[in-house]
Image (spheres, rainbow, N blue to C red):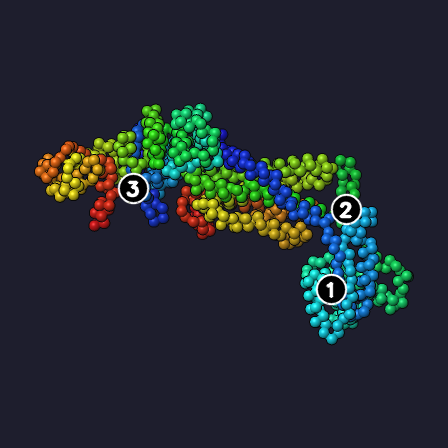
């Protein structure tokens, strides 16, 4: 059964179409990653799932219920920009948000999460006194403290240091282990690749990718060679069949035209320079993202 | 607990737990009553320096009388009989012979002496003052001073001159001053409160003599308290919602409650804040007045109306403030909307004195029936006199109820759209568009 079912949803603001005929199913218990460039419609979609915005057309069902006018207590929502009352004490603001969702045992749950995310010492301090990372963790607790069955996180890892990002990542996976469905948006393709069961990409309001990472990569085939060479990127760009060279410093990633045999390309490169290692790979999510939304794609579209 | 109540509770606690609220509760009446207290304090404080008054008497009839009157007054009123301390300024009259050739030059010279502080004022008495009906133009008395219109000495000057002129007129008809020495004695009409029946003993209670200060100050207490309660309960909602919008708190809250419930909770919080403040002042006031034996001043008949009007006012003005606040992206924008928000509160304050003086005038009646002004002005009229028709009191309440419902409905529509809209500057056009079209 699906936690969320979006059917042909369109949302416009004035003359701007933020979401255009979107359909999407989010299975229960899954971790679903929303990716897409800034302004592509991610937050609008999340807000519509939250019933904060109403779609102009189409329908959204959460746990089988039509959303319009329905209760959203089963959903926890963490917006992109943190929304905490600055003057309130951390524990009070968490209880307020938990109780606003009619959560059970909110008091105990607040204390458990404060301990889990190493914030117990800050429980009686005003939100004002928290660092940005701490405030982000508090906002996360506010989202999950009512034990929602669906958790929606808008850019949860942005601005966190690696230690706190790991703590939050583990917390998200713990929620999934308990059967919670998690939807989050992110600009970090590594996070999306590692954490998500399904990835959905929205671009200019329309769905451009949807499925498991493997399924998405399959769409693009094994058209990528990752290799370490003595020769630079310019040398490699001149080889026949190389469509694009991405230089990552320690290694380079080549995109090969579909008509060209990757074996021949490697052989041609070996003839030109010393190759230390090579690997035939499927494109990374980062690469796929750039192919869809990067400047080259935009140029092609304009042409 | 209902979500609306949870939001109301948070709003209430967030306000009443602050030091500002507690401090405001104590200081607000001091600040508001400050001018009254200052007036009362200054009333006893008099500048006792002598006042030099020059008189240019073209009639030749007034100067002497004025000198005599000043002398008599100086002996009688300037020094305290018991302590011998100077308690009033003495009036020193300087008789200046009229310059018949160039009266205008003389006026200028005397004016300059007033400017230099050598004189307090100068008085010019025209030649024909004894029989003003014969030539009204040549029978004026001019009082020249820096603030002549509000100068109390001007009024004092009138009486001895006029009394003397009256005696002269009687003398022309053969009536001697000794024949009727109390001819021009003056008896003032004392301001008395209306006679009423004592509810405990059933006796008819004698009306009391009231002072001007009391007549003005007592009826103002409840209207001023209403103003204070609206300032405490409804106006802060504007900044509260601006914080919730700019800090993106609204987005989190709206993930849990509907905009209408969010707004309703906040208005209820404001109502609770004002009820707390009103209870503090009313209970405190009743205890204090009873303690000092002034319980007759407690306006029990108006208190229920006060509470009813206050509830309506907080709901109506609170909802409007929330709508305005939801339009703003930051505190600066909110500041620019303060004037239109405060206008319904300021207008009654501007007209408080004319309404106080004539509570039954058409102006006062009509204004007190216009919903945003009703809470303060109807209350003021009711406090000044008991006879405000009951239908007007109920009509005021009904008008408030209707206005509050309309305000909540329209504000809810604006709030729903505006609260999540970032970066759009507040425009009154948007306010009306969203209110009517949603």
Q: Which residue is mark 1?
A: B122
Calculate the distance from the C-alpha at mark 3 to the C-alpha at mark 1.
Answer: 85 Å
Q: Secondary structure at mark 3?
A: loop
Please provide percent x and percent y for residue B410: 48, 45
Q: Is residue B360 visible?
A: no
Q: Residues within 10 Å of mark 2 (few under 14, many from 20)?
A: few
**What's the chain of the residue with tag 1?**
B
Residue A168, position as x, y percentages in the image: 35, 30
Instruction: From this view, report whether residue B81 is shown above or below residue A129.
Output: below
Q: Earlier in the sequence, mark 1 or mark 2?
A: 1
For the point 22% across and 31% down, the residue is A214
Q: Nearer the viewer, mark 2 or mark 3?
A: 3
The residue where tag 2 is placed is B209
The reply to whether residue A254 is visible in this rendering is yes
Image position, residue A156 (x, y; %):
35, 34
The spot of residue B54 in percent (x, y) is 75, 64
Q: Which residue is mark 3?
A: A37
State which quadrant residue A62 falls in. top left
**What is the chain identity of the residue bearing mark 2?**
B
Q: How many marks?
A: 3
| Residue sitting at x 77%, y 44% | B207
């Amino acid at each position: 059964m699906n936690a969320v079912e979006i059917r042909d949803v369109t949302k416009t603001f004035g003359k701007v179409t933020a979401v255009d005929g979107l359909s999407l199913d989010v299975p229960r218990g899954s971790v679903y990653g929303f990716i897409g460039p800034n302004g592509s419609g991610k937050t609008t979609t999340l807000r519509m799932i939250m019933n904060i915005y109403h779609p102009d057309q189409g329908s959204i069902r959460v746990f089988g219920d039509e959303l319009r006018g329905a209760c959203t207590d089963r959903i926890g929502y963490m917006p992109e920009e943190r929304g905490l009352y600055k003057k309130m004490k951390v524990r009070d603001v968490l209880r307020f948000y938990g109780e606003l969702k009619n959560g059970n045992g909110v008091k105990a749950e607040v204390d458990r999460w404060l301990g889990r995310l190493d914030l117990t010492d800050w429980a009686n301090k005003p939100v004002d006194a928290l660092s940005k990372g701490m405030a982000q963790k508090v906002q996360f607790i506010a989202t999950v403290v009512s034990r929602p069955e669906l958790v929606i996180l808008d850019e949860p890892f942005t601005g966190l240091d690696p230690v706190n990002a790991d703590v939050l990542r583990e917390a998200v996976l713990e929620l999934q282990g308990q059967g919670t469905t998690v939807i989050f948006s992110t600009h970090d393709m590594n996070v999306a690749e590692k954490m998500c069961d399904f990835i959905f990409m929205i671009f200019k309001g329309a769905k451009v990718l949807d499925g498991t990472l493997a399924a998405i990569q399959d769409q693009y085939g094994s058209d990528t060679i990752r290799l370490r060479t003595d020769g630079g990127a310019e040398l490699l760009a001149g080889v026949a069949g190389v469509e694009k060279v991405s230089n990552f410093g320690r290694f380079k990633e080549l995109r090969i035209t579909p008509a060209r045999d990757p074996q021949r390309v490697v052989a041609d490169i070996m003839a030109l320079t010393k190759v230390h290692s090579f690997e035939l790979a499927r494109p990374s999510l980062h690469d796929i993202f750039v192919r869809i939304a990067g400047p080259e794609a935009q140029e092609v579209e304009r042409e | 607990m209902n979500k609306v109540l949870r939001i109301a509770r948070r709003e209430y606690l967030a306000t009443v737990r602050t030091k500002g609220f507690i401090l405001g509760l104590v200081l607000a009446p001091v600040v508001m009553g400050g001018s009254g207290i200052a007036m009362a304090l200054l009333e006893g404080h008099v500048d006792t320096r002598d006042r030099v008054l020059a008189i240019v008497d073209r009639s030749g009839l007034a100067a002497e009388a004025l000198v005599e009157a000043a002398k008599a007054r100086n002996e009688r009123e300037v020094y305290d009989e018991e302590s011998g301390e100077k308690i009033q300024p003495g009036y020193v009259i300087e008789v200046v012979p009229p310059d018949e050739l160039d009266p205008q030059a003389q006026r200028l010279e005397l004016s300059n002496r007033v400017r230099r502080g050598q004189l307090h004022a100068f008085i010019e008495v025209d030649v024909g003052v004894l029989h003003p009906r014969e030539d009204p133009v040549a029978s004026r008395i001019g009082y020249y001073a820096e603030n002549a219109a509000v100068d109390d000495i001007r009024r004092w000057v009138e009486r001895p001159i006029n009394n003397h002129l009256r005696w002269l007129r009687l003398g022309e008809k053969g009536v001697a001053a000794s024949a009727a020495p109390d001819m021009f004695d003056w008896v003032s009409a004392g301001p008395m409160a209306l006679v009423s029946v004592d509810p405990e003993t059933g006796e008819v209670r004698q009306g009391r003599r009231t002072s001007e200060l009391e007549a003005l100050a007592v009826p103002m207490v409840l209207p001023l308290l209403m103003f204070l309660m609206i300032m405490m309960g409804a106006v802060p909602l504007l900044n509260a919602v601006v914080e919730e919008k700019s800090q993106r708190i609204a987005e989190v809250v709206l993930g849990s409650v509907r905009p209408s419930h969010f707004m309703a909770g906040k208005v209820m919080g404001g109502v609770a804040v004002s009820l707390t403040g009103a209870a503090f002042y009313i209970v405190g006031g009743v205890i204090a007045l009873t303690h000092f034996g002034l319980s007759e001043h407690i306006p029990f008949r108006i208190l229920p109306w006060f509470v009813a009007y206050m509830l309506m006012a907080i709901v109506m003005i609170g909802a409007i403030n929330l709508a305005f606040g939801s339009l703003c992206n930051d505190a600066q924008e909110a500041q620019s909307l303060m004037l239109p928000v405060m206008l319904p509160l300021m207008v009654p304050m501007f007209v408080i004195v004319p309404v106080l003086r004539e509570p039954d005038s058409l102006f006062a009646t009509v204004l007190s029936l216009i919903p945003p002004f009703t809470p303060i002005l109807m209350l003021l009229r009711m406090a000044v006199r008991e006879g405000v028709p009951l239908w007007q009191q109920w009509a005021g309440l009904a008008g408030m109820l209707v206005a509050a419902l309309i305000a909540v409905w329209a504000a809810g529509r604006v709030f729903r759209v505006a609260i999540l809209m970032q970066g759009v500057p507040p425009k009154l056009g948007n306010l009306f568009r969203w209110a009517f079209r949603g």
